[in-house]
Amino acid sequence: MTTIAYRNGVMAADSGSWIGDASISGAQKVAAGHDGTLYGVSGVAGHCCNYLAWVESGCAGSEPMPEVRPDDGSSFIVLIAPPAGPLILRTAQGDEVYDTAYMSVGAGNVAALAAMFCGASAEQAIEAAIAHAPGAVGPVQSIVRR
């Protein structure tokens, strides 16, 4: 389970990965594109890793797209923060566009959104999710727009 938060040019995430009921810290969940776009991923670990590798390669070739799962969910989701314009949430069902100053998705998104509503940074929002939401595991990782 994952929590991703974006605010003021910073994308942050927890770093937990789950194998059954066991959590393992250290999963990479955020990356920056060469154009300054920030990406945060949540979902099936292999799919998320492939997506971030695509970003780090300069977005060369076809974009790995989320697939529909049997439960009608997405194999993974991507929170995209371009250098200008609204935030984009990419899922297997298509893109959702959010013209907002901050956003959070994932297991601890309610705690993270509440923290940012009260003025917290993206990193502080992830700390709030780790402290108060099941499924969010630290440490916090973040990337700042260049």
Image (tube, rainbow, N blue to C red):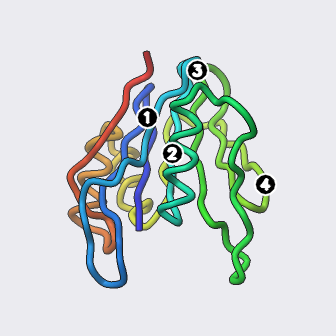
Nearer the N terminus, badge 3 or badge 4? Answer: 3
Q: Residue at x 67, y 73 (%)?
A: 73
Q: Could you say where residue 55 lies in the image, as x and y percent from the top left? A: 56, 34
Q: Nearer the viewer, mark 2 or mark 3?
A: 3
Screen quadrant of the C terminus: top left
Q: Position of residue 63 (x, y in %)?
A: 71, 41
Identity, as a three-letter code, of the amino acid under mark 2: Met
Instruction: Please say if the residues under marks 1 and 2 sit with CB atoms less than 8 Å apart.
Output: yes
Q: Residues within 10 Å of mark 3 (few under 14, many from 20)?
A: some
Disc 1 marks which residue? 7
Q: Callout 1, which amino acid?
A: Arg
Q: In this view of the protein, which residue sits in the foreground, 34 or 84?
A: 34
- Measure the alpha-carbon separation of dots 1 and 3: 12 Å
Identity, as a three-letter code, of the amino acid under mark 4: Gly
Q: Nearer the viewer, residue 58 or 31?
A: 58
Q: Which residue is mark 2?
A: 103
Mark 2 or 4, which is nearer the eye? 4
Question: Residue beneath label 4, please?
Answer: 94
> Considering only order in the chain, which callout, 3 or 2, is on the residue closer to the N terminus?
3
